Amino acid sequence: MAAVTHHPFLSSKLRLTTKPNPSRIGPTAVRMSLQETAPSLAVVGVTGAVGQEFLSVLSDRDFPFRSIKMLASKRSSGKRLTFQGRDYTVEELTADSFDGVDIALFSAGGSISKEFGPVAVERGTIVVDNSSAFRMEEKVPLVIPEVNPEAMDGIKLGTGKGALIANPNCSTIICLMAATPLHRRAKVQRMVVSTYQAASGAGAAAMEELELQTREVLEGKSPTCQIFKQQYAFNLFSHNAPVLSNGYNEEEMKLVKETRKIWNDKNVKVTATCIRVPVMRAHAESVNLQFENPLDEDTARNILKNAPGVVVIDDRASNLFPTPLEVSNKDDVAVGRIRRDVSQEGNHGLEIFVCGDQIRKGAALNAVQIAEMLL
């Protein structure tokens, strides 16, 4: 599990002492969240970057709960957390951790999820898992609430029956938040995605190393390369996921396979190239769409302006479009550079540029929104 970091690009809430949203500080916010009739929660991997963001989002959205367990590795057990004005002790994750837990938010890596996810389900817990462990399992719903909420039909709180729900890969979430409203209108036949992925996708330690390398290079020193094994500062390179026999890396194939599952369309053609860029916590993606039915850019822009969780930043006159900095610590995915693909006939192709916070909508926010659908 990733260690807690005090990196400045992590939100102020991503600290061992986790504070509620300043706009909601006070007894009212605590009363709204802490309710005897609400579900009991557990956060697995609570000391990592996404685990801390879970707490931030739960607080920001006044998610109701009657109790919450803070779970992490043995190394982190015993640490103290303050959440919504109350002190908590981080507990070591064990098979007994899920007794009496209604909803568990997991972000502790695939191996931990594979070991403890099924254990939690056996205890009657509904698990929302942020790892890739269960995403492609046929009976496990892979959910973006704005895109395919129907995938969760049949999973209910209060039945005593546990379940697994998978959070998609961050790049998939950010891409499909923008592509899906257009897909609903004109049906995407082929999608070509190029990603520009931030350090946060590799965890808090990668963010720390990017900052360290930047200082080292500016001071004329050799950069410390422990996370990525090559210079990251002032550089970019193919995503560090393992490369498969077909020449694609695992990150690229996640986009391909997850899109087909989420859209419930095995025939949609998807290809991706994923690149790691020296940005702290928000991903950017260039997305080329080919449609079965015509869709002009003005109609597409209006569709996106009305899409939930999407904001359009598309000012050609000022050359103002989405940037990773602009969406950092924000919930919405930003879309711009909306234009007809001149390589395709008529209005059957569009180009868009998308940015989204990898830790927030790309991970923690999406998981909490899934949990909200269970209430």
Image (cartoon, rainbow, N blue to C red):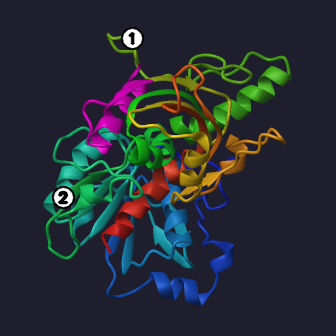
**Residue shown at the point (38%, 40%) measured from the top left:** 187
Pinpoint residue 69: horizontal percent, then vertical percent.
37, 68
User: In the picture, which quadrant includes the C terminus?
Assistant: bottom left
Provide the secondary structure element on which disc 2 rests: helix
Residue indicated by mark 2: 121
**31 versus 287 height, above or below:** below
Q: Residue at x 53, y 57 (%)?
A: 53
Q: Is residue 230 covered in magenta?
A: no
The three-letter code of the residue at mark 1 reads: Gly
Q: Can residue 261 be seen here?
A: yes
Instruction: Indicate whether residue 258 is drawn in magenta.
Output: yes
> Which amino acid type corresponds to the residue marked 2 in the rendered image?
Val
Q: Quadrant of residue 325?
A: top right
The residue carrying pointer 2 sits among few (fewer than 14), some (14 to 19) or many (20 or more) residues within 10 Å by Cα, namely many
Residue 247's disc number: 1
> Looking at the image, which residue sits at the far front?
346
Q: Which residues are magenta?
A: 249-271
Pinpoint residue 349: horizontal percent, then vertical percent: 51, 30
Mark 1 burial class by Cα count in 10 Å: few <14, some 14-19, many 20+: few
Label disc, if present, on residue 269 of the rendered structure: none
As rendered, which of 104 and 374 lies closer to the eye? 374
